[in-house]
Image (spheres, grey):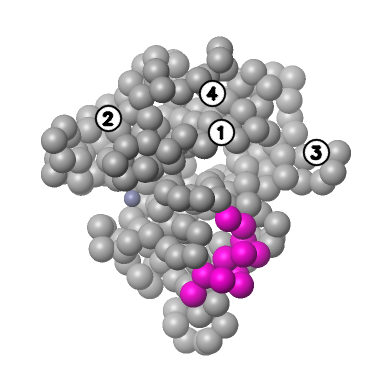
């Protein structure tokens, strides 16, 4: 699993390209296709961690150009499809995304065969519903078996950033966010975290340095 990080736009949202051989997945389609060097990679799936326009602005273009499918958490799909709800209608150009979007559920485990990928069966993608930033935010846990062990990478959207969490005043909820922090803190310490903005981190680093994680030790905040 190779991970390419492509920040873009005034808000520097991160698009991720996750490469397995000649196949790839995209997380958060926010970069124009011509700015991505896909090198002939076959894009098998385009995941939207949540509906905010800075993360989905190129979803339709990239889907059409690659012939891939769009995937999002089930509760977030109607928000992605509505430019008033995805808050893009407040910007210069409302973002239009058309159906279909593949609706995911909490705990779904996706395998290479689900994307018609042949010749590899050594990774899974687990869907974690992590509301808080938005009601239908999700994180995606990629787990790949290697000779050295299991390589685990969490794509956290705007739920978790290095040292903090995402805003909860754009359609979200702080109690939900704290429950989502708890859920992520229960993942193995060696899970690397790739947020929707800013640098990568890891579960262990957040458990020791992120105040929203360390506060979990002090009872009754949830
Ligand atoms: Zn957002």
Quadrant of the snapshot with the C terminus: bottom left
Can you tell me whether the CB of the residue at mark 2 lies under 8 Å from the nearest atom of ligand 1?
no
> Does the image show residue 73?
no
Q: Residue at x 39, y 18 (%)?
A: 34
SS of the residue under disc 2: loop
| Disc ID at residue 44 | 4
Q: Earlier in the sequence, mark 1 or mark 4?
A: 1
CB under 8 Å between callouts 3 and 4? Answer: no
State the residue position of label 3. Answer: 146
Q: Residues within 10 Å of mark 4 (few under 14, many from 20)?
A: some
Does 206 sit above or below residue 46? below
SS of the residue under disc 4: strand
Q: Earlier in the sequence, mark 4 or mark 2?
A: 4
Quadrant of the snapshot with the N terminus: top right
Q: CA distance from mark 1 to mark 4?
A: 16 Å
Q: Residues within 10 Å of mark 3 (few under 14, many from 20)?
A: few
Q: Which residues are magenta?
A: 201-211
Q: Report the predominant secondary structure element of the magenta stretch.
A: helix
Q: CA distance from mark 3 to mark 1?
A: 19 Å
> Does the image show residue 34?
yes
Q: Earlier in the sequence, mark 2 or mark 1?
A: 1
């Amino acid at each position: 699993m190779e991970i390419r990080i492509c920040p873009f736009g005034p808000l520097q949202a991160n698009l991720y390209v996750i490469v397995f051989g000649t196949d790839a997945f995209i997380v958060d389609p926010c970069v124009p296709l011509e700015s991505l060097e896909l090198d002939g990679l076959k894009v098998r799936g385009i995941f939207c961690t949540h509906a905010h326009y800075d993360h989905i602005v190129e979803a339709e273009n990239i889907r059409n150009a690659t012939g891939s499918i769009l995937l999002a958490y089930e509760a977030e799909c109607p928000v992605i499809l509505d430019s008033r709800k995805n808050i893009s209608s407040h910007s210069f150009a409302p973002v239009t995304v058309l159906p279909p979007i593949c609706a995911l559920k909490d705990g779904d485990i996706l395998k290479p065969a689900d994307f018609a990928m042949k010749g590899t069966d050594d990774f899974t993608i687990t869907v974690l519903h992590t509301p808080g930033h938005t009601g239908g935010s999700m994180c995606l846990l990629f787990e790949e078996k290697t000779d050295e062990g299991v390589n685990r990478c969490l794509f956290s959207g705007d739920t978790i950033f290095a040292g903090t969490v995402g805003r909860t005043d754009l359609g979200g909820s702080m109690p939900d966010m704290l429950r989502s922090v708890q859920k992520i803190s229960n993942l193995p310490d060696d899970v690397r975290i790739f947020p929707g903005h800013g640098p990568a981190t890891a579960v262990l680093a957040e458990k020791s340095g992120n105040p929203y994680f360390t506060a979990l030790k002090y009872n009754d905040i949830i």
